[in-house]
Amino acid sequence: MKTNFLYVGAAVVFAVLVIVYSTATSNLSEEIANISGDKKVEIISEELVVRFPVNLEFKRPEVLNKVRFTPVKFSHFDHQDVNCAKCHHTWDGKSQIKSCAAADCHDNLKQKAAPNSYFKAFHTLQSDISCRGCHVKMNKEGKTDLAVAPCANNACHPKQDRAHN
């Protein structure tokens, strides 16, 4: 009889710990969701410290021509279910994350069709590590309904009203 009470007691304690843990975890997501602008988040575990901007606007390398599309605004919070290394595919999980245009990554800034093209890093349709490829795949699977075409006036490059003089 005492053994049954011991098992029930242990199960209750375990259930309480799971509830406390899940509440603490969901509060972190809510805290991150409430951060806006260029503020950064810092997540610390025993093995790793990660700092990242919650929301950012992609800054094209200066050597590229000016484009007619609006800059892409990106939210790490909206992508929290994606493993960081999926997009940051050269990251070892320990060192600082490099720019996409860094040497030996997507450093071809002039030729859009080149394998190491900066443009292809974001726009390759047949790759689920590019923004466009991943979102097209998710749309086909019914997980999202994100407008990825046409190039202008879509979810990535929304139409921007121009100020009239």
Image (cartoon, helix red, strand yellow):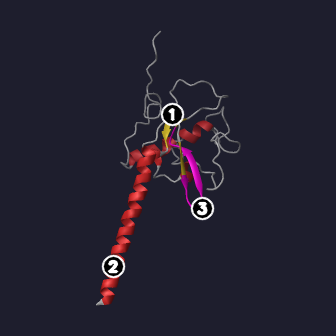
Measure the C-alpha gap from mark 1 to mark 2: 53 Å
Q: What's under tag 3, amino acid-wise? A: Glu
Q: Is residue 24 left or right of residue 120?
A: left
Measure the C-alpha gap from mark 3 to mark 1: 32 Å
Describe the element under mark 2 as helix, strand or loop: helix
Q: Position of residue 37 (x, y in %)?
A: 49, 35
Camera-nearest label, 2 or 3: 2
Q: Position of residue 69 (x, y in %)?
A: 51, 26
Q: Position of residue 51 (x, y in %)?
A: 57, 48
Q: What's under tag 2, amino acid-wise? A: Gly
Q: Quadrant of residue 24?
A: bottom left
Residue 72: assigned label? 1
Instruction: Give the main secondary structure, helix, strand or loop, of the magenta stretch.
Output: strand
Q: Quadrant of residue 16?
A: bottom left
Does residue 139 lie above or below 44 as drawn?
above
Measure the C-alpha gap from mark 2 to mark 3: 33 Å
Label 2 neighbourhood size at 10 Å, few (<14), some (14-19), many (20+)?
Answer: few
For label 3, the residue is 47
Residue 9: assigned label? 2
Q: Nearer the viewer, residue 116 or 19?
A: 19
